[in-house]
Amino acid sequence: MIDNRMADGSTVFVAGHRGLVGSAIVRALERAGHMSILTACRDELDLTDSAAVEAFFAAQRPTHVFMAAAKVGGIHANNSYPVDFLETNLRIQNNVIHSAWQHGVRKLVFLGSCCIYPKVCPQPIKEDYLLTGPLEPTNEWYAIAKIAGIKLCQAYRRQYGFDAISLMPTNLYGPHDNFDLLSSHVLPALIRKFHEARTAGRDEVAVWGTGTPRREFLYVDDMASAAVFLMQHYSDERIINVGSGRDISIGELARKIAGIVGFEGKIVHDTSKPDGTLLRCSDVTRLFDMGWRPTVALGEGIRLTYEWYRDHEHSIQRRGGA
């Protein structure tokens, strides 16, 4: 088999380098220090424009690609903008995967999401559970787009021998996250809620849902470490889970974040809001058996994320929360 690992002289394109995952992958590659890192801002390259993407690959000729660009958001955003989450993500990933193959990229890492799995399936979630049941309705548009990306990578591998692999990260958090209260995921939203409540002297914070659903979380720099590790050591059409293998209830998470932020008031649960999937924890046996492990515990990751949020609070508010 041809060795498609990154090495001295490689040119690595990180699509979506300003986002949560992409920025962490850039940091991980910079620490490795032996390849050229290629990035492009949105005003320089519109990934939904197929002609622009093809021209970019033809001119820049990257040897490796991390496909971290996507339109992402929480339950409210997915429910409110189904066309955006489905169509935009399909366009982005179709353009990048096709142009990567067309212009001789040696290897591509496609980043999916744990929401691709059925709403109800055995726990922890094994990779084989994909497409074995209905999706969670609150994020099915995003999930369908990601499943299409997985299948496209598998199709290019089968038909053309293109070395494209698909990783399924669990719920990620960390620096450069989205802290908007309407479009963000639960952990950054809670950090902002508790911080603003403490700063304003409020004595109560409302948390969506009952607090009973359980979620698995992974600090984004651990995710980036795993992505680089798998780029170097994994080549298979089967998807592979990336996570911590540990879950926590939303209620427990809220109390942990409140303690780190320093909010001492009351936490109430708004049961008029949806819970989403009740249980979601990845089976990471395959990845752990390869020798990779996360290094940042949840409490430490929340502390680091909160420090980043405080350092960037004013710029976040100027951008409207994202």
Image: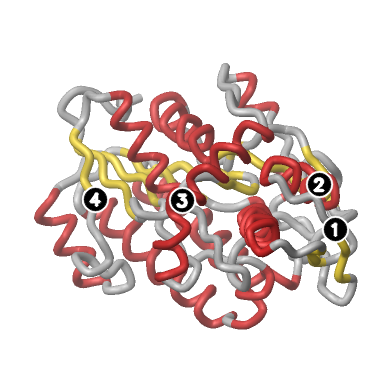
Residue type at mark 1: give it: Ile
Do residues under tags 2 and 3 come within 8 Å of each other at their CB atoms?
no
Q: Secondary structure at mark 1?
A: strand
In-front residue for pair 182/17: 182
The quadrant where residue 243 appears: top right
The residue under the point 90% across, 62% down is 210
- The mark that comes first in sequence, 3 or 1, is 3
Q: Secondary structure at mark 4?
A: loop
- The mark that comes first in sequence, 4 or 3, is 3
Is residue 207 visible in this depiction of the protein? no
- In space, the residues marked 4 and 3 are separated at their CA atoms by 14 Å
Do residues under tags 2 and 1 come within 8 Å of each other at their CB atoms?
yes
In-front residue for pair 193/20: 193
- The mark that comes first in sequence, 4 or 2, is 4
Is residue 194 visible in this depiction of the protein? yes
Does 217 sit above or below residue 244? Answer: below
The picture places residue 185, in percent across and down from the top left corner, at 63, 60
- In space, the residues marked 2 and 3 are separated at their CA atoms by 24 Å
Q: Which residue is mark 3?
A: 20
- The mark that comes first in sequence, 1 or 4, is 4
Q: Which residue is mark 1?
A: 267
- The mark that comes first in sequence, 2 or 1, is 2
Does 251 sit above or below residue 193? Answer: above
Q: Residues within 10 Å of mark 3 (few under 14, many from 20)?
A: many
Q: Which residue is mark 2?
A: 255
The residue under the point 67% across, 78% down is 79
In-front residue for pair 205/38: 205
The residue under the point 69% across, 52% down is 130
Do residues under tags 1 and 4 come within 8 Å of each other at their CB atoms?
no
Q: Is residue 65 left or right of residue 282?
A: left
Q: Residues within 10 Å of mark 2 (few under 14, many from 20)?
A: some
- The mark that comes first in sequence, 2 or 3, is 3
